[in-house]
Image (tube, grey):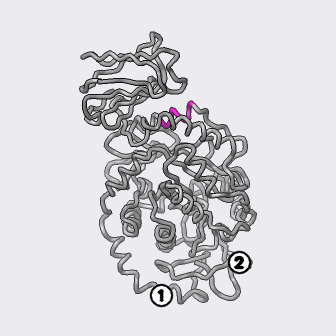
Amino acid sequence: MRCTTSSRCFISCGDTGCRRDTRPQAAMKTSPTPVLPARWGGRQAVSCCLAVVLAPLLGLSSLAVRAAEAPPPTDAAALAHWRALRFGMFIHWGPVSLKGTEIGWSRGAGVPVEVYDQLYREFNPARFNAAEWVAVAKVAGMKYLVFTSKHHDGFCMWDSRHTDYDILSTPFQRDVLRELADACRREGLLFCLYHSICDWWHPDYPLGSPGGRSRKPAPDMERYTTYLKNQLAELIQNYGPLGVLWFDGEWEEPWNETRGRDLYTFCRGLQSSLLINNRVSKARNDMAGTSRAGFFAGDFDTPEQQVGRFNLDRPWESCITICQQWAWKPDDKMKSLEECLRTLITCAGGDGNLLFNVGPMPDGRIEPRQVERLREMGAWLVKHGEAIYGTRGGPFKPGNWGASTRQGDTLYLHVFEWPAGGELRLPPITRKVLSSRVLTGGEVGVRQTDEGLSLRVPPADRQPIATVIALKLDGSAWELAPVP
């Protein structure tokens, strides 16, 4: 919450306590009535903000009732639309890019806390252009974008009414999130947000560093949860509608199953079509990202830095970096085009989405070499997009040979490696193949028997990363049962 006194006070709190300093007039804004009563800057906002805290109390009952309800079912139409998009851009960015270390995780582990927490004072990404970011995503063939509104370090990349530890308090003084949301909608990209449940900066959140090595002196999880809800309501209502709310930081001890169910219900009450991942609660099975039985699991699973397993029943999305680090790192090793595209293909073949991460530089640009790699991916998708977008995985499960996708009456085979004899053999299917073609042109020979499918493509017509073959069937490809 922003202090509205004439003194323009700013309370900055970290592991070492709270401190007061002054801010430039332009950096301070009056605070409208919050959704819920809030705590700010490590102290109860009594003297200067009592009126705005008391004002919303009459309106609390409806939100409280929403939160007490059982989680609503997934919006089936929203889920189907999101799954069909298949390929999205993930963006991790913030003041930490000035150091080139990992976002959140390097706070107190590589960068001293007192240094990390003051990086925002130097953050002035003068070359940031939301339209350029969105253009890069579109050229890459990405259909949605997930931006980090707040990572584990607590810094907010939007103009928040509930804290001064945000982008408007930097020398940049522009609402990055607003500009990006508007740019996405202008260009038809589904706009989504990442938001960390844990907050190592906030004085009310019990833990203050990766791995819980430090604890806050006087935490209050109930008060922190109110702050969390305040900000989520702000994001959903002022920057929405959102496609996905992508939670993270749920693994730490202060968060629990009950809070996760409550938060899911609260957010869906604000936007019924919102999709929320399985990290809202305690369901996630480590980095595999699958959901454990008996836990509330949101709307989809989240494998991290690995391709999810073939699964036609439970929606999933792999989040994977284009380099090694989530946030920008100088000279970070970048994945080859082959690795990037085969990752995308294998995700689609397993019936999952790929959320591919870039970390913009301190000046606000996406690194040119990353832009070029994404452009190369987009060029491939121009020729092969029909075998990715709007498809479902299978029936053949991904393997060393490649992967398969399907849509309507067409089965797509993405062949990575051809056997030494030049003939690819696959198990039988229950539909008859009527015709075949290579998406990039050329001949394909298909022989179908009770024993299976045999395919041949002349070496001159094969593609180095994946030769994609379309088989037109005599009925729905979706009716084919999964084949090992």
| Residue at 38% from the left image edge and 48% from the top image edge | 291
Q: Which residue is mark 2?
A: 26
Q: Quadrant of the N terminus?
A: bottom right
| Residue at 35% from the left image edge and 27% from the top image edge | 471
- Secondary structure at badge 1 equals helix
Q: x, y (%) of residue 290?
A: 40, 45
Nearer the observer, 72 or 141: 141
Gap between marks 1 and 2, in whole Å? 26 Å
The answer to whether residue 435 is left or right of residue 318 is: left
Asked if residue 392 shows in the view, the reply is yes
| Magenta span main SS | helix
- Secondary structure at badge 2 equals helix
Q: Which residue is mark 1?
A: 55
| Residue at 30% from the left image edge and 59% from the top image edge | 73
Q: Is 68 placed above or below 329 here? A: below
Nearer the observer, 248 or 421: 421
- Report the mark closest to the observer, 1 or 2: 2
Q: x, y (%) of residue 427?
A: 31, 21
- Quadrant of residue 118 within the rendered picture: bottom right
Q: x, y (%) of residue 204?
A: 55, 71
The answer to whether residue 392 is left or right of residue 246 is: left
Residue 55 on the magenta span: no
Estimate how packed mark 2 is, as few (under 14), some (14 to 19) or many (20 or more) residues with alpha carbons within 10 Å: few
The amino acid at mark 2 is Ala
Chain part drawn in magenta: 338-344
- Quadrant of residue 375 within the rendered picture: top right
The amino acid at mark 1 is Ala
